Structures are given as C-alpha cells and as structure tokens.
Amino acid sequence: MDRIPILRMGEFLLVTIQVDMHDQLALTLQDDLTAQITRTGARGVLIDISSLDVVDSFIGRMLGSIASMARLMNAETVVVGMQPSVAITLVELGLTLHGIRTALNVEKGMALLRAGAARRSRA
Amino acid sequence: MPVVKEETVAIGSDADVVLVRQRVRRRAQELRFSLVDQTKLVTAASELARNALEHGRGGEMLLQVLEEPPRSGLRLVFVDRGPGISNVELAMKDGYTTGGGLGLGLGGAKRLVNEFAVESAPGAGTRVTVTKWH
Ligand SMILES: Nc1ncnc2c1ncn2[C@@H]1O[C@H](COP(=O)(O)OP(=O)(O)OP(=O)(O)O)[C@@H](O)[C@H]1O
Ligand SMILES: [Mg+2]
C-alpha cells in the first residue's frame, strides 16, 4: 500500500492507520491530509492509531506537524486510541506530543471535535 | 555470554527500517518480553536503524539472542560505514540534531534499553550496541 485512505465524515476527516508505516508513507499522509483539508474545508481531523504498536520519533513528529498544519487551516486534530505501552514508551523516549489533543477512542475523539467546532462557530 | 541465535538485517531503505522493527518485535515476543519492554526495544531499534540510514548512509543490524540463565536478553548492534560522529557526548544530548530531526533518537534509545554503547570515529562509521534483558 502506498497511501493511507482518508475518510470524510461530515465536516471532519478520519484517518485510520492500520499498517506499520514506512517513513515515505507517513510523509505522503501528511501531504494528502493538507490537500484534503484545503479542498473540503474540514474543521477537524481524527487520527486513529489504535493499531499502531510503535510510535517512534519520526511518527511522533509527523503527528505534530499534521496538527500544526491543520491548525493553520483552522482545523483541529485529535489522535485517538494510543496503546498504553506506546504511551509509556513515548514518555521515556522524551517525546511530548504537545499541541496534540488525544482521546481514548473514535467516539470520544469525535465528541471533542464536535464540541470544538461548535465553540469556534459561536466565537 | 552465550549467543544462542543470530541474524542480520540490512538497512538500506525505509522499508528496511520497518523490517528491523518487525524482526525485533518477533524475537522479543519469542523471549516473552512484556508488551511494554517489547515496545521500548522496538522503538529504540527504529530510532537506531533510521540513524544508520539517514546519517550513516545505510548499514545493518545484527540481532543476537543471549541466554545467561536465569536471564535472557536481546542484543542489537547497528553498524554503518558513514561519516561517524565526531562528538558522541554532544550527539547523545536530547535536542541535538544535525538534520531536521528532534534530536531524540540516540538519547531516547539509551533510556529505552538496559545497556547502551556507541563507538564511532570521524570517517570510520558508527556502531551502536544496545541490550535489553528479561
Ligand atoms: N549513525 C550515525 N552516523 C553519523 N551520525 C549520527 C549517527 N547517528 C546519529 N548521528 C548524529 O547524532 C545526531 C543526533 O542523533 P539523534 O538520533 O539523537 O537525532 P536525529 O536523528 O538528528 O533526530 P531524531 O532521531 O529525533 O529524528 C544526529 O543529528 C547526527 O548528527
Ligand atoms: Mg535519529
């Protein structure tokens, strides 16, 4: 597979990462997401990493840059489903995913995105 | 210290970094490492394999299964023939990078394993050896 599919759900984009990504695949995802946010005017991006059994500094950095780019385009990013062993390892690695919102699962992540979008439309 | 199994994985592309992760995961599972220890070792391996690829122009990983009753362990040796590291102490510092990275790979990998050693000299390549015991 040379692309990770991006699903559109209303005003949000949903990405489920199901493979152990090589670096180029991660970079392609980053580009594809940026293009999709621009094209669809999406208000939020939800990235499900529950199938990932490792997140190293490269993937961590990619999640961070997706979140910053999305923010510049007025979209929020929520990463959901991080396995506990991955979370523990990230802390020891020294990678703080600051600026990235996280939630336990897709449902809770969606709720966060909806609340954020509602808050921003009121503002 | 008896090495009971050995294998080598070449590191020449992105796909090989994925292969390194898979091989290390499989061995760590065979040795019944806890899930957290598996994840730590695989993450360290991913960092070091990528360093060998990006900074060392590619190389290889030697994987050794160690039996030293009552404990067993996995030793990973990452070798490249790249430019080497002129100041290892500096390179180990979190946040130090000569590329566009976060500078977390070396320091982070050290925290994720039980034993860690870097041998390098300018022009002579780099060898990083890590061991995790179970
Ligand atoms: N195998 C190697 N050969 C030559 N130089 C290396 C090697 N490994 C690391 N280095 C040097 O040490 C520095 C720090 O490495 P480290 O892995 O900590 O960070 P990084 O690779 O720059 O970024 P990150 O790993 O966070 O993406 C590198 O920028 C590079 O200059
Ligand atoms: Mg590195």
Image (cartoon, rainbow, N blue to C red):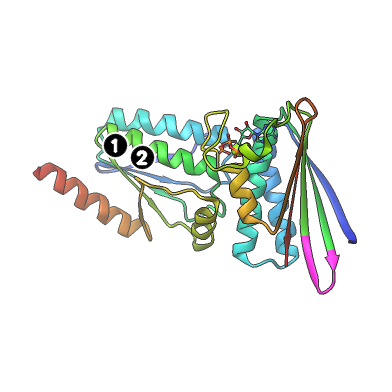
Horizontal side of A15 relative to A56 (left or right) equals left
Instruction: Work out whether B34 lies above or below B84.
Output: below
Which residue corresponds to mark 2?
A: A67
Q: In the rendered structure, which amino acid carries the disc numbered 2?
A: Ala
Which residue corresponds to mark 1?
A: A71
- Residue shown at 38%/59% (left/top)? A105
Is B16 or A100 nearer to us in this picture?
Answer: A100
Crowd tier of the residue under label 2, counting other residues whose Cα lies within 10 Å: few below 14, some 14–19, many 20 or above: many
Query: Do the numbered discs 2 and 1 sit on residues whose CB atoms are within 8 Å?
Result: yes
Crowd tier of the residue under label 1, counting other residues whose Cα lies within 10 Å: few below 14, some 14–19, many 20 or above: some
Q: In the rendered structure, which amino acid carries the disc numbered 1?
A: Arg
Q: Chain of mark 2?
A: A
Horizontal side of B97 relative to B79 (left or right) equals left
- Which quadrant contains ligand 2? top right
Predominant secondary structure in magenta?
strand
Quadrant where the image shows the N terminus of chain A: top right
Is A21 or A59 nearer to us in this picture?
Answer: A59
Instruction: Work out whether B45 lies above or below A25.
Output: below
In the image, is residue B72 part of the stretch drawn in magenta?
A: yes
Residue A123 place in picture, x, y as percent: 10, 42
Q: Chain of mark 1?
A: A
State whether label 2 is within 8 Å of ligand 1: no
Q: Which residues are magenta?
A: B67-73
- Which residue is at the far bottom? B70
Look at the numbered disc 1 and give the secondary structure of its residue: helix
Horizontal side of B52 relative to A37 (left or right) equals right
Horizontal side of A123 relative to B17 (left or right) equals left
Q: State the mark number for residue B105.
A: none
